Image (spheres, rainbow, N blue to C red):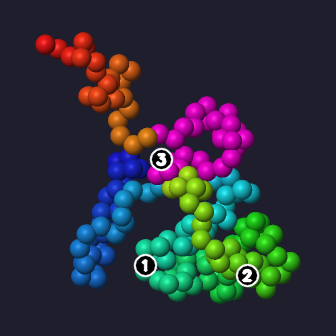
Amino acid sequence: MRVPQVLISVGRRHVQYVNHTYGRTGTLWDGRYKSSLVQADAYLLLCQRYIELNPVRAGMVADPALYRWLSYRANALGEVDALLSAHPLYLGLGANDHFRRAAYRDLFSCALDEKPLAELRLALNQDQPVGNDRFYLEIEAMTGQRRELRKRGRPRKRDEPRSGKDFDQAELPL
């Protein structure tokens, strides 16, 4: 059995175990796994804000500190979490833990701007890197793959009209 098949099998068995144990039904995860390469110095903190505000946007909690599965409580409030290690960008937010936590909380005092939020969502949904133009060029050079955000749906064929309105009367078959 190949690795993907093993992981699929383990995933199915895990879902069955959890559903049986906790008397629930359905999937454990909503949608497929998504990931994107992130240009840390420009976008890491934006990504962290996006992730840590997801439960707030979903109406699950009023404040990210109330959701136990986030790193917010460690980064903003100093709660010890052995599973986390501080990123150098986080460490650069202040000279000591007190100032770093205060600066991190300040990042959450205003709403995320809609334009970078929309760009981030689009990149995540399409497994595209998140960064500036120079970062994209570096990634394209390293991987040999062109970075392009694609519109949803099947790509149009070259000669395929966009809609019925694109036909002239002379082009309609009689």
Identity of the residue drawn at 57% across and 37% down: 147
Q: CA distance from mark 2 to mark 3?
A: 33 Å
Give the labeled residue for mark 1.
Answer: 59
Kindly identify the amino acid type of the residue bearing the numbered disc 2: Arg
Give x and y (percent) for residue 151.
Answer: 43, 41
The residue type indicated by label 3 comes to: Gln
Labels 3, 1: front one = 1
Q: Which residue appears farthest toward the front when viewing the image?
A: 169
Under circle 1, the secondary element is loop
Circle nearer the viewer, 2 or 1: 1
Q: Secondary structure at mark 3?
A: loop
Q: Position of residue 112 (x, y in %)?
A: 60, 66
- Which is more N-terminal, label 1 or label 3? 1
**Span highlighted in magenta in the image:** 122-150
Whole-Å distance between the Cαs marked 3 and 1?
25 Å
* Residue 121 shown left or right of residue 164 in the figure: right
Q: Tell me whether circle 2 and circle 3 mark residues in contact (CB < 8 Å).
A: no
Residue beneath label 3, please?
126
The residue shown at (28%, 83%) is: 22
Q: Amino acid at mark 1?
A: Gly
